Amino acid sequence: METLFTKIIKGEIPCYKIAENDRYFAFLDISPLAKGHTLVIPKIQNDYIFNLDDDTVAGMMVFAKKVALAIQENIPCQRIGVAVIGLEVPHAHIHLVPISKEGDLNFTNPRCKLSDEEFRQVAAKISASVKL
C-alpha cells in the first residue's frame, strides 16, 4: 500500500516542494514546529530508516545537509535540528527543524500556523538556495 509520502512524490497529493533528485525528495511539513520545518524522504518506500541500505541512508543525509544549509540561509535560527522519529507516517523520513534552543525540537510543542501563501513563500526562498 502506498504511503502519503509516496503519493506526494508521484504528484498525486500537493506539497510545498523544496528539492528533489532521482533518489530523494524534500518538502515543507504542513504541521511545522517552526517556519521552514522540512521533511526529507527517500523515493523508495520503506517504513524504517534503519532498514534502508547503507548507501541510501548515507545519500539521504548528504541530501538533507544541502537542504538544511538552504533552510539556515533563509530562516533565522541558531541551528537546524535533525530528528528521525518514524512513527507518524510509515515511510522513512528526516525532520529538519530551524531551532534556537534545544526545546524547539520538542514534538509536543504547539505547531506553527502558516497560510498557503506563507508556505509558498518559504518554500520558494529555501528551494532557490538549495545547491544539489
Image: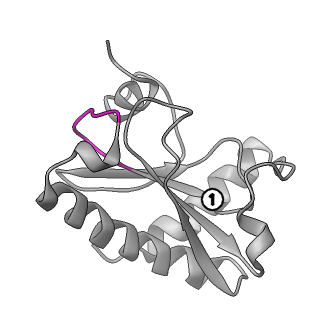
Please tell me in which quadrant of the rendered image residue 103 appears: bottom right
Q: Is residue 4 above or below residue 51?
A: above
* Figure disc tally: 1
Task: Indicate yes or no whether the magenta region holds residue 32.
Answer: no
The image quarter in which residue 72 lies? bottom right
Q: Quadrant of residue 105?
A: bottom right
Magenta stretch: helix, strand or loop mostly: loop
Q: Please name whichever residue, 16 or 49, is drawn nearer the observer in this view of the structure.
A: 49
User: Is 3 drawn above or below residue 61 in the view shown?
Assistant: above
Residue 17 visible, this orientation: no
Question: Could you tell me the amino acid type at mark 1?
Answer: His
Residue positioned most to the top = 1
Q: Is there any visible trace of residue 101 in the rendered image?
A: yes
Question: Residue at 31% across / 12% down in the picture?
Answer: 1
Residue 99 shown left or right of residue 27 in the figure: right
Q: Residue furthest front?
A: 50
Residue at horizontal 76 percent and vertical 81 percent from the top: 100
In the image, is 102 to the left or to the right of 124?
right
Part of the protein shown in magenta = 41-47
Q: Is residue 61 above or below residue 23?
A: below
Q: Position of residue 63 (x, y in %)?
A: 31, 67
Question: As displayed, is residue 116 above or below residue 104?
Answer: above
Q: Measuring from the top left, give residue 123's x and y in whole percent.
A: 57, 58
Q: Quadrant of the C terminus?
A: bottom left
Residue 29 percent coordinates (x, y) = 61, 47
Q: Is residue 43 magenta?
A: yes
* Residue 99, horizontal then vertical, whole percent: 71, 75
Q: Which residue is mark 1?
A: 37
29 displayed left or right of 26: right
Q: Residues within 10 Å of mark 1 (few under 14, many from 20)?
A: many
